[in-house]
Image (cartoon, rainbow, N blue to C red):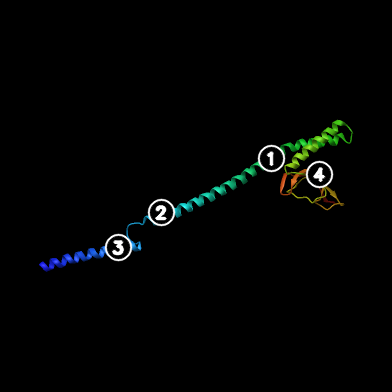
Amino acid sequence: MGQRAESLDSGAQGNEDESRKKDAQGNKDGDSGTPDPLAEARNQVTELTDRWRRTAAELDNFRKRSARESAQQRTDEQARVLSVWLPVLDNLELALEHAGSAPDGFVDGVRSIRDQALAVVDGFGYPRVDDRGEQFDPNLHEAVGTVPTADHRPGTVLHVVRPRYGEKDRVLRPAAVIVAAEQR
């Protein structure tokens, strides 16, 4: 029994030695159960750097989107205010038409005010456009009447009742027009 106890002791000791060797090798290879603090720190730095870059990109996109939306709101508000003033311009035009070509100081003053108002509207990017002779376009014109004629192609703008303000891509108000129709 003495030999047997001795061999059991040496077997247990051999298992412990093998376990220590494996632990030592595992620490060298990085396969041990204990985490490597340096590797964890590097992973955390990589993750935080990635999150920081994504957040910076989101912030940049937000700034660009905010600037775009702010510019659009400003443009929309300018158009709204200018469109409210267009009837005033129309009335100045009517006053000048009724005054005719009278060389009166009052008429000259009204004409000067009308010209100044037109310059302001044009300065905001909505020039007054004369559409006489143009082909009718429902995006730019509002037909208020038709006149049968053989002198013009059907669909040609013959008379502008109320002028258009703005270019093709940015119309403040479409023109009210009388359009040529086919003569029967």
Alpha carbon of mark 2 to alpha carbon of mark 4: how far? 75 Å
Inter-mark Cα distance, 1 to 4: 25 Å
Amino acid type of the residue tagged 2 in the rendering: Ala
Q: Position of residue 63 (x, y in %)?
A: 58, 46
The percent coordinates of residue 84 (x first, y second) are 72, 37
Identified at 74% across, 42% down, the residue is 123
Give the residue pinned by disc 1.
78
Q: Nearer the viewer, mark 2 or mark 4?
A: 2
Provide the residue designation for mark 4: 160
Query: Which amino acid lies under the numbered mark 1 shown in the image of this protein?
Result: Gln
Q: Position of residue 156 (x, y in %)?
A: 81, 50
Q: Earlier in the sequence, mark 3 or mark 4?
A: 3
**Dot 2: within a 10 Å radius of its alpha carbon, few (fewer than 14), some, or many (20 or more) residues?**
few
Q: Look at label 4 and name its amino acid.
A: Val
| First reached walking from the N terminus: tag 2 or tag 1 | 2
Point 85% across, 37% down: residue: 97
Q: Which residue is mark 3?
A: 24
Element class at badge 2: helix
Residue 158 horizontal/vertical position (percent): 83, 47
Eye-nearest disc, 2 or 1:
2
Residue found at x 75% / y 37%: 87
Q: Are marks 3 and 4 in contact (CB under 8 Å)?
A: no
Q: Amino acid at mark 3?
A: Ala
N-terminal label among 1 and 4: 1
Against 86, residue 2 (above or below) is below
Q: Which residue is mark 2?
A: 41
Which of the two marks, 1 or 4, is nearer to us in this view? 1
- State the separation of the CA atoms marked 2 and 1: 55 Å
**SS at mark 3?**
helix
